Image (cartoon, rainbow, N blue to C red):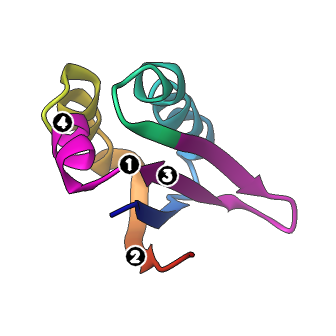
Amino acid sequence: MKVTKQVTFIAKEDSIEQLKDMLKTMVEPSKNENGCLLYDIFQLKDNLRKFVVIESWENEEALDGHKNSQHYKYYKANFEPFCEQKFSDDLDFI
């Protein structure tokens, strides 16, 4: 079953560009992974500190593979100094 997530990041005041750069490094490698249907990052015009990642995977197995990738592990180990808040939602689409 398809898995779609929305992950929201709020950058620290002085770390907007650093967080943006780190999140951007995830796009191409993630899109090239087996089972990736969608992976895009958006920055809100009216709140430049807010980034929204929308990702969709063929199934849980594909998402698990993503979570075991080198680029995901690097991001997980390094994003916190730039991020004030992070939250995610699972989205149910037909």
Graded by Cα atoms within 10 Å as few (under 14), some (14 to 19) or many (20 or more), the crowding at tag 3 reads many
For this view, does 65 lie left or right of residue 18? Answer: left
How many other residues sit within 10 Å of disc 4, few (<14), some (14-19) or many (≥20)? some
Asked if the stretch drawn in magenta spans residue 66, the answer is yes
- State the image coordinates of residue 44 (x, y, percent, origin top left): 78, 61
Give coordinates of residue 22: x percent, y percent. 46, 31
Mark 2 or mark 4: whose residue is earlier in sequence: 4
* Highlighted range, magenta: 38-67
- Classify 5 as above or below 81: below
Q: Where is mark 1, residue-wise?
A: 58
Q: Nearer the viewer, residue 77 or 60?
A: 60
At numbered mark 1, what does the secondary structure look like: helix, strand or loop? loop
First-in-chain label (3 vs 4)? 3
Q: Amino acid at mark 3?
A: Glu
Labelled pair 1, 3 in contact (Cβ < 8 Å): no
| Quadrant housing residue 13 | bottom right
Q: Residue at x 62, y 43 (%)?
A: 40
- Point 60% across, 60% down: residue: 52
Coordinates of residue 47 in the picture (x, y in percent): 77, 67
Disc 3: which residue: 55
Under mark 1, the amino acid is Glu
Q: Which residue is mark 2?
A: 90
Whether residues under marks 2 and 1 lie with C-beta atoms below 8 angstroms apart, the answer is no
User: On the image, numbered disc 4 is attached to which residue?
Assistant: 65
For the residue pair 87 and 66, the one nearer the viewer reads as 66
Quarter of the N terminus within the rendering = bottom left
